[in-house]
C-alpha cells in the first residue's frame, strides 16, 4: 500500500497528516526519511496536532526521545536518531519498550536504526521539489 502527495506546501500539512493517519490507521510506527531540513519534524507536529497532543512538539535532537500526551492522556513517542553513533545506543534507551508499546512512535533518522525497525511500519519519505518550495511525500507500508 502506497500513498504519494505531490506539491505539498506548509499549509497543506494538516490535511496530509490527517490523510496519512487515516490511511494507515492500523499502524503505530512511522519511520521518517529525508534530508536535513526536508520537513520531518514539521510533518510530525501536524500528525501530533491531529492526534490531540497539547504538548509542545519539537525535535528531540539531543534527548533522542520526547514523550507527548494527547488530551485523552495517551502517550506518543517522538525519536530523533540523528546523533547516535551505533544501534547499541538505541538498545541503551530501551527502544523495544517504546516500539512495541502499542503507542504511536514517530522516528526521525530511521536509517540509523534500520535493522531495529519492527516488521510492520509506515515508511515516510519526504523529498524537496527542486522547482519550488514544495515537498513530495511518499508513504508506504512495510
Image (spheres, grey):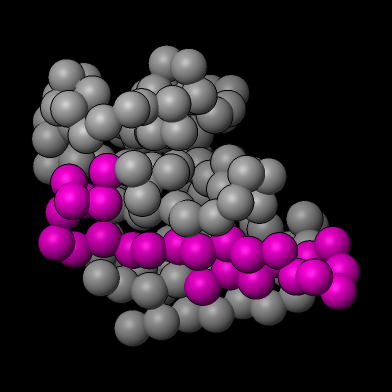
Point 17% across, 27% down: residue: 88
43 left or right, relative to 139: right
Point 58% across, 69% down: residue: 137
- The answer to which quarter of the image holds residue 121 is bottom left
User: Relative to the observer, which residue lies in front, 103 or 37?
Assistant: 37
In the rendered structure, which segment of residues is drawn in magenta? 113-138
Residue 37 drawn at (x, y percent):
68, 44
Residue 135 drawn at (x, y percent):
71, 66
Asked whether 102 falls inside the magenta stretch, the response is no
Q: In the rendered image, which quarter contains the N terminus?
A: bottom left
Point 61% across, 76% down: residue: 5
Asked whether 127 falls inside the magenta stretch, the response is yes
Residue 131 drawn at (x, y percent):
86, 74
- The answer to which quarter of the image holds residue 87 is top left
Point 36% across, 27% down: residue: 84
92 left or right, relative to 52: left
Amino acid at each position: 500500500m502506497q500513498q504519494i502527495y505531490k506539491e505539498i506546501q506548509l499549509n497543506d500539512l494538516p490535511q496530509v497528516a490527517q490523510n496519512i493517519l487515516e490511511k494507515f490507521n492500523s499502524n503505530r510506527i512511522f519511520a521518517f526519511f529525508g534530508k536535513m531540513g526536508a520537513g520531518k519534524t514539521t510533518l510530525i507536529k501536524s500528525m501530533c496536532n491531529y492526534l490531540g497532543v497539547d504538548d509542545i512538539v519539537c525535535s528531540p535532537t539531543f534527548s533522542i526521545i520526547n514523550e507527548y500526551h494527547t488530551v485523552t492522556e495517551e502517550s506518543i513517542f517522538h525519536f530523533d536518531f540523528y546523533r547516535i553513533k551505533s544501534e547499541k545506543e538505541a538498545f541503551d534507551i530501551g527502544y523495544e519498550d517504546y516500539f512495541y508499546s502499542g503507542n504511536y512512535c514517530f522516528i526521525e533518522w530511521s536509517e540509523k536504526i534500520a535493522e531495529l525497525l519492527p516488521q510492520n511500519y509506515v515508511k515516510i519519505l519526504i523529498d524537496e521539489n527542486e522547482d519550488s518550495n514544495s515537498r513530495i511525500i511518499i508513504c508506504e507500508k512495510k
